[in-house]
Amino acid sequence: MIDKKLVAWGSSGNIIREIAEYGAEQAKKVGAENVYNFTIGSPSIDPPAIVRETMERYLNTVPAAKLYTYAPAPGYPAVRQKIADYLSETYSVRYRGQDVIVTCGTSTCLAVLTRVLLSGGGKAMTFAPYFMDYKYYAESVGSSLIECPTESGTFQLDVDAAERYITPDTMMLVINTPNNPSGVVFTRERLEGLAALLERKQKEYGHPIYVVADGPYRELVYDGQEAVYIPSIYRNTIDCYSFSKGMSLPGERVGFLAMAEDVDGYADIMAACMGVIRSFGYICVSSFWQQVAVDCIGATSDISRYRENRDLLYGSLTDMGYTCVHPDGAFYLFMKTPEPDAEAFARRAMKENLLVVPGDPFGTPGYVRVAYCVGHDVIKRSLPTWRKLAEEYGLGK
């Protein structure tokens, strides 16, 4: 018999893509310029110029037989070494080439590590709001995801809450900063407090607690904010990264996991990761794109355009009377809905061709996520619709 849990996951679909698909159909009917789609976190600005230059260099100088052949399962050794060198130099955490595995984006890292770290029992924990697929990863291995609340009103990391929620069953803690969906950047002070807490809990429980750092947005920070590199403050951290966001390459599916050799259980974890990658079929990341991406490592798109979008959207919505969490990173704004039922608000907005995502699947009812990685003109054109809804709900009075 087919696992009913898998059937349920597949049948329920993904509400983000459901609403986005609705928007695509509406665009055919009323014109794309009249649909304001803030659902998908897909970069809207071009990759840095070096990406095209590097693509052309490979296409013009490398024989096709070498360019498109199968890559080794963990990635080309030269690619892994370049990643290790970059991380070591940038973040002062020592990595070797063999400490890096090239993956199909961050999602693969998270799915693989969840299976590896929870296969012997134990539970995962994360901070709400969080990316909805974390729960699927945990449940797929017969475990569960514990949702620890963040600070009310700010969604900043709450170390006291973490202490209440961590138990002897806690084996892994997924941390996403800058955060999807809130755009909040966890402060160094809070993260160092959490690291000290985890060190104490490891000693108390007699086993490691691994932090899985979900960091694809770490270049997307504004106003002098710092995206703390968590492996630099907590030893038992495994870094997960994707070139999708900062380099605007979401469809190429290139990322990596990196784990320093002093992480507890290093050898077994690395071997198990490769075992899971083989068993899941997550092998041979694009030969072409892993080489192109790593040759451009450290380059980012013009993120000032996201900051301009954030400033326009946040300023306009708060002026209209909406309550929003100020986003210091990523390209999402988390807005409190003017009625308790976030899905009802999202459905009402859909009737005006304004598309946002309810916060319930992110573990935070009563909010919607607004992805502002769109053209600046889209935000401008959407403002009358936002105002119409604000007036309908009696905001700003």
Image (tube, rainbow, N blue to C red):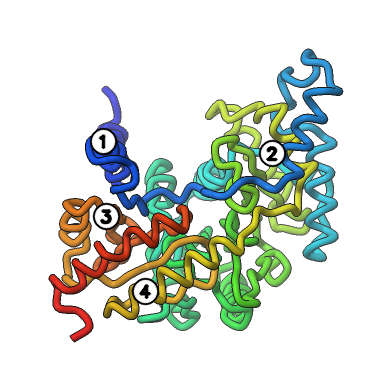
Residue nearer the viewer, 287 or 61:
61
Mark nearer the viewer, 2 or 1:
1
Alpha carbon of mark 3 to alpha carbon of mark 2: how far? 38 Å
Mark 3–mark 2 contact, CB under 8 Å? Answer: no
Residue type at mark 1: give it: Glu
Residue drawn at x 20%, y 79% is: 395
Q: Where is residue 157 in the image (x, y as percent from the top left)?
A: 49, 76
**Viewport quadrant of the N terminus:** top left
Q: In which quarter of the image is residue 387?
A: bottom left
Q: Name the residue under label 3.
A: 354
Disc 3 secondary structure class: strand
Residue type at mark 2: give it: Val
Which of pointers 4 and 3 lies earlier in the amino acid sequence?
4
Alpha carbon of mark 4 to alpha carbon of mark 3: how far? 15 Å
Q: Mark 1 points at which residue?
A: 25
Q: Mark 2 points at which residue?
A: 102
> Seen from this angle, which residue lies furthest top?
65
